[in-house]
Image (cartoon, grey):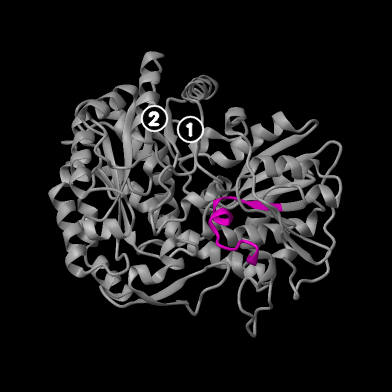
Amino acid sequence: MPSANAASVTINCCYFKNMKISLLAVPHTHPTCPPLGPAVLSSYLQENVADISVSVFDLSLDYYLSSFAKMKEGSLGIRLYKWDEKTTAANIEQAVSFLRRWHPVQGELKEYNHWATLFLSFETVFNAFMADMAERALYDQPVPKAIENFFAELLQPVLAEDPNLIGLSVLYQQQLVFAALFAKMLKQQSDAKIVVGGATLSVMHAPETLLVNPLAPKTEDRPEIFCRDLFDYLIAGEGELALQRLCLAETAEDLRHVPNLIYFDDGRLRINAPDSADIELFPFPDFSRFRLNDYLTPEPVLPLMTSRGCPWAKCSFCTHHHSYLRYRTRKIEDCVAEIKFLQERYACNLFYFYDEMIPPRRFRKLAETLISENIEIHYGAYAKPVKSFDDELCSILKHSGCRVLQWGVESASQRVLDLMCKGTSIDDVQQVLHCASRAGIFNLVFVLFGFPSETLAEMEETIRFLERNRDDIHAMSSGTFVMAEGSLVQSEPERFSIRAICEQPQSSLLYPALDYETSRGMTPQEVRQHYNGQQKFFNEIPLSPRFGTYREHLLLYGAGNDGEEAATGKE
């Protein structure tokens, strides 16, 4: 796919006889759990590429740790509420200390909610400020010297490794500005090739636009910046096989056989065909390069996956299933072997399954295998609220160590659920929540307000459902509908009473945003107004309003309250 506007750039291969690759998780994700992607990539490359040295950096964690240290010493000033900088720093230090040592017991949520709310306030203020600073630095606009040094210090350990190839993992859209800035800074000090991948690129409708189009419209004080000057390669899709072949590519012809790769070859944009490695052959993830005791949990919580892709893959608002080429599962026996390995290697007894969802039959087999092998762990997972999750299955899951289940409830209006293509019945959803709660499993529900054509009456129907079932809802993550590019809603708008779609004025590659108009139901403005008016109610439903954000803490709470308490554990 040639680009008439593309500059003529020759991209050399990154092959070296003794390859050194650094994998970076860029800011920012919540500092409660190490990233799974770099851990999997690291072990895969070590097993499948000879003479390779792999270094891994969770720069998101380092970003937070550095901020804590600099606030304490006074070189970074942040103010929350009506406090001065010194008081803010002292309170954040207390919050971090509390979250690292919190071992919850029944009823002790008031103190947790205080400190978790304080830390979330810090994250909100600090991350917005640093994203603005990163964008300004990216465009060579003046930023305080202390901020320049902050970013430079984060990258010094990476540069000290002297890698030939640097991989930047971008899980969420808000990380892209940091990835772009870090790539710019790295290129000023290193000859390493830079490859960017992760879920954000995988779900983009046309990820090649990152190389073809400017990051943001040109303004009087900002020049156009193209990511093709910062990123040598993009990997849009699964990264294991792609990175392996990229590391081994010695010629331009070799590059053309790297799956999922997007790059310029002498001014010509190339988009290679998709492919993926056999997940049955994956080695266990390598967390040895992560400082597990520095995360904001009293003991490590490790992520893992038993499958890739979504077995349903029909929800009309969702693009998550685009992250993987297709739905594939690993053998249950191999998954359990991985759990045993991680438990022994890292002295870890808390796990989060990051599968898009685990279907009931597969979940039963996993749980029964954990029980039969006498593996004592606590874990959380995503599941679809269908009636197969009855009392019997939920009891088996609880016995196997399941303490948290995350359910995509979305709406209590059956019409809206059907329009979303959820494949669920609201009556079944209510029963599933009750069965899980009765078994002693803590329920985290996802709720989505303002789906196109939803009426105020339907929104209130969901609110009444939440009120009616509040004893079975222990954590909640709610929000208003945002149109995702590449979703069924965006590609077939007429099915959802959408008569117009346009980009918001401030939309850019860094911060894409779509506006839309509907021919029925509430407008987006009305949705936000009604949603904001319900915030007090939403905060009162769960055990803690922070559990929907810090889900590892919900797992800790569930593990620490290991009786038949899920249904009655509220203060």
Residue 559 in the image: state x and y as whole percent. Answer: 32, 29
Q: Is residue 538 left or right of residue 403?
A: left
| Element assignment for label 1 | loop
Q: Which residues are magenta?
A: 195-209
Q: Is residue 49 magenta?
A: no
Q: Is residue 562 above or below residue 414?
A: above
Residue 304 in view in this figure? no
Q: Identify the amino acid type marked 2.
A: Arg
Residue occupied by mark 1: 306
Badge 2 marks a residue whose secondary structure is helix
Residue 182 position in % (x across, y down): 67, 57
Left/right of residue 208 with respect to residue 191 in the rendered view:
left
Q: Please tell me which residue lies in front, 551 or 86.
A: 551
Q: Residue 206 magenta-drawn?
A: yes
Asked whether residue 370 appears in the rendered view, the answer is: yes
Which residue occupies the extreme top position in the image?
Answer: 373
Dot 1, how many residues are within 10 Å of its Cα: few (below 14), some (14-19), or many (20+)? Answer: many
Query: What is the quadrant of residue 271 in the picture?
Result: bottom right
Asked which quadrant contains residue 564, the reply is: top left
CA–CA distance between discs 1 and 2?
A: 10 Å
Amino acid bearing label 1: Thr
Q: Residues within 10 Å of mark 2 (few under 14, many from 20)?
A: few
